[in-house]
Image (tube, rainbow, N blue to C red):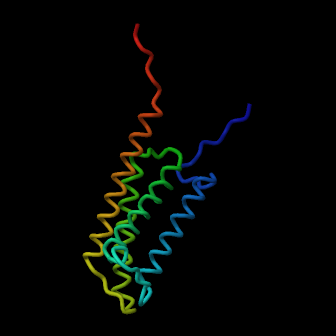
Amino acid sequence: MTQRKPRSTFELNSVPTKIWLLATLFVAGLIACLSLVPSPPQMPGLLGWDKLQHAGAYGLLSLLIAQTLNTLPRLRPEKAWWRAALAAICYGGLLEILQLLMHLGRTAEWSDLAADALGVIICCVLFRQAAVIKSRRNRPVKEARG
């Protein structure tokens, strides 16, 4: 009988982990590009509201980070949400600092970081609730007493 190696917490060889990680990196790169170019494209109407764009982009990023973490072995889904929230908010802070330091016509704003954090918190709370509901559904049903 062959012994199987225990899976490491940071094993990235599974296909779902690779897919979620690539999606996360793509969105993070897209956010960086749109945050650092001198004049990003403008959308009409409500979707053109800067703070809504920040909340939506970082909310999506936090969900992708949480889902990537959720595919890793030995990491409980209940813990993935807060790690994803912290990572996404720190990433938003880093991009605001880069906007300040790069002098490309972009300005760093506390209100942008607040919008980032609000989107992250909303999405991560929803992710956590979904994980709790999913874990309840996957729990074995106790036999009824007769």
136, 77: nearer the viewer: 136
Q: Quadrant of the C terminus?
A: top left
Where in the figure is residue 66, as x and y percent of width and height? 44, 55
Residue at horizontal 45%, vertical 77%? 32
Question: On the image, which quarter does residue 119 sit in?
Answer: bottom left
Q: How many marks?
A: 0
Where in the figure is residue 74, as x and y percent of width and height? 50, 44
Where in the figure is residue 8, as x and y percent of width and height? 56, 48
Residue at horizontal 54%, vertical 54%? 10
Q: Quadrant of the N terminus?
A: top right
146, 86: nearer the viewer: 146
Question: On the image, which quarter does residue 137 sit in?
Answer: top left
80, 37: nearer the viewer: 37
In the image, residue 139 above or below residue 33: above
Question: In the orientation shown, which residue stands out farthest toward the right?
Answer: 1
Relative placement, left or right, of 47 versus 73 is left
Question: On the image, which quarter does residue 89 sit in?
Answer: bottom left
Residue at horizontal 38%, vertical 77%? 95
Residue at horizontal 35%, vertical 72%? 54
In the image, residue 22 above or below residue 104: above
128, 93: nearer the viewer: 128
Where in the figure is residue 78, as x and y percent of width and height? 39, 45
Relative placement, left or right, of 99 versus 3 is left
Question: In the orientation shown, which residue stands out farthest toward the top?
Answer: 146
In the image, residue 84 above or below residue 48: above
